[in-house]
Image (cartoon, rainbow, N blue to C red):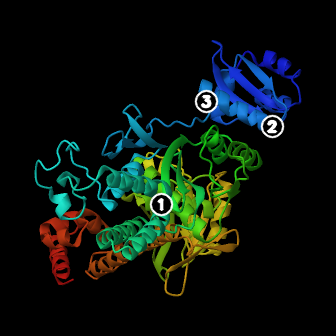
Amino acid sequence: MNQRLPYLREKTQKLTLSPGVYLMKNKEGAIIYIGKAKNLKNRVTSYFRENPDHTPKVAAMVSNVFDYDFIVTDSEFEALLLECSLIKQHKPKYNILLKDDKGYHYIRISDEEYPRLTTEKNTQKPGKYLGPYTSGFITKEAVSEANRVFMLPVCSRKFPQDFGKSRPCLNYHIKLCMGLCRGKISAANYRQTVDQAVEYIKKGSADSIERMEQEMNEAAENLEFEKAAMLRDRISAVKKAAEKQKIINSGVSSADVIGTAEFYGGIYISVLMYRENRLYDKAVFEFEKPENSEDILSLFMVQFYHGRDDIPKIVVADHIPDDSALIEELLHRQSGRNVKIHQPQKGRLYELLRLAKNNSAEYAAIKNNRTGKEVIALEELGQLLGLEKPPKYIEAYDISNLSSESMVAGMIVFEDGRPLKKAYKRFSIKEQAFQNDYGSMQEVLRRRLLRIGTDEDEFFRRTPDLILLDGGKGHVGAVMPVVQELGLNIPVFGMVKDSKHRTRAIAAGGKELQINNLQSAFMLVTRIQDEVHRFSVSYMHSRHRKKTYKSELTNVKGIGDKKAAQIMLAFKTKDNLKKASPEELAKAAGVNLETASELWKVIQDI
């Protein structure tokens, strides 16, 4: 416990009710947390009250607070700007920080008589620069595409020094280079082509095609057929490149599309930046998931846009952030125009939002040795079921029987979207004399949940993030009293099948949630349902075969159920039993050799 709490509480009683920023400091005077508040007194008081309900991270921060400072502002918006500025300046330990340690990338137009287009990581070399860009991949792609489309040289030759010194390389013959090395292209014409390539990078394909088509028509009218043919080929190359990369008529003139994905306690945020109907840049960031109720999208957007010059007309996100009004005001003041934060439900922007989320998921997957589909599936499932986070550890159950015979249950486990087969468990139904799926499910769940935290088995000790039952709302209703009776807070849902035994919906709270519109989650639940059904049915058939085999043994005089069970236990498999000699059978069953010989004959005929 923090021994300074009495002092901090007394100091807080004198705080103003005005908006402002507070700076928590440790014993050494270092700033460990910075926050903004609409009402400074109310907000700071919440940290130092008598019976706090803090998350572990906030509790750790409070335990290290020796003192705090505050700065009063005229409005909550000014507090927002000041908070962001101070966080960037001091980088406090307990704040979520927008770290971008990948550096920036630039496109350089070299300062030469015959300029080249290249990618650079700084602006130290002489020439003009486009950028900065966050994504090195997109920067390289833009330069590569412009050089290819406009047939600019990418070789190491020096011009005009190397004109005519050797034959053109392969790129010239396969029409990837204009053949500048031949010395037949003037500096003025070459610079005009470079200018067109730069315009293509800046404004995209649509504008370039329109301008080149106009030039081509003018060249044809002036009987400059060679120039017209060159422009025709260039237009074709632009269209081909644009079709491949989907940058013509993207339908978005100016927007940032922000997609998030959550996995392994981390939040991954991808920003796709569209300008002039094309994908202009991309950035990906990774954060630890905040342990309090702060909206990470709100925290991210404030830090991401504060101080930026290139502000889009619209920001697309999967939900409207908590401080949306303040963020829109920030974007308005920085850009000089209204900027809207939008949550699309359908259409082109919704498609781009899914693309951004897929980018975040793929990044998360790479970082955690998973696939993007697995990340998205768990996130979709968690959101559909209203869980606080994607379910990392899922247990699924199914009851299988033949009437009232061979009643069993199967439990399978999926961890991080994949089967964890070493955690699978089989249960024999012991308390139900007759077929009763609800009663059997209650029995199995009680036997399993009683072992949480105490069992020697490492998997039985674990608490699942989610329990799925192969069945509808009746199964969920039967099991929930057991979960509540044991004082556990584990979400339980049913997997509902259609008449063809295919996954149709999720049973929850007396109603059904449709899942077929969430492709990744649907495929995951279907896979879980198919796997638990296969596992339980295979166990039921195995038990039934053993019972049938055992009954054949009891047909031998002197062999009852007990001795038959002894024999099955001793030899375990049918193959071992067939290989056993009469002497070995006699020893295992505790019978004389004559009875064992009869038993041996029956076994060979089964």
In the picture, the quarter occupied by the N terminus is top right
Q: Quadrant of residue 548?
A: bottom left
Cβ atoms under marks 1 and 2 closer than 8 Å: no
Residue 19 versus residue 497 in the image, above or below: above
Judge whether 541 appears above or below 246 on screen.
Answer: below
In this figure, which residue is indicated by the disc labeled 3?
88
Q: Which residue, given by chain and number where applicable, does mark 2 sit on? A: 76
**Is residue 361 in view?**
no
- Which label was assigned to residue 384? none
Q: Earlier in the sequence, mark 2 or mark 3?
A: 2
Q: How many marks?
A: 3
Q: Secondary structure at mark 1?
A: loop
In the rendered structure, find residue 204 and report the number of the disc placed on it.
1
Tell which circle, 1 or 3, labels the residue nearer the N-terminal end.
3
Q: Which three-letter amino acid code belongs to the residue tagged 2? A: Glu
Kindly identify the residue that appears in the image at 26 percent across and 52 percent down. 153
Badge 2 local density, few (<14 within 10 Å), some, or many (20+)?
some
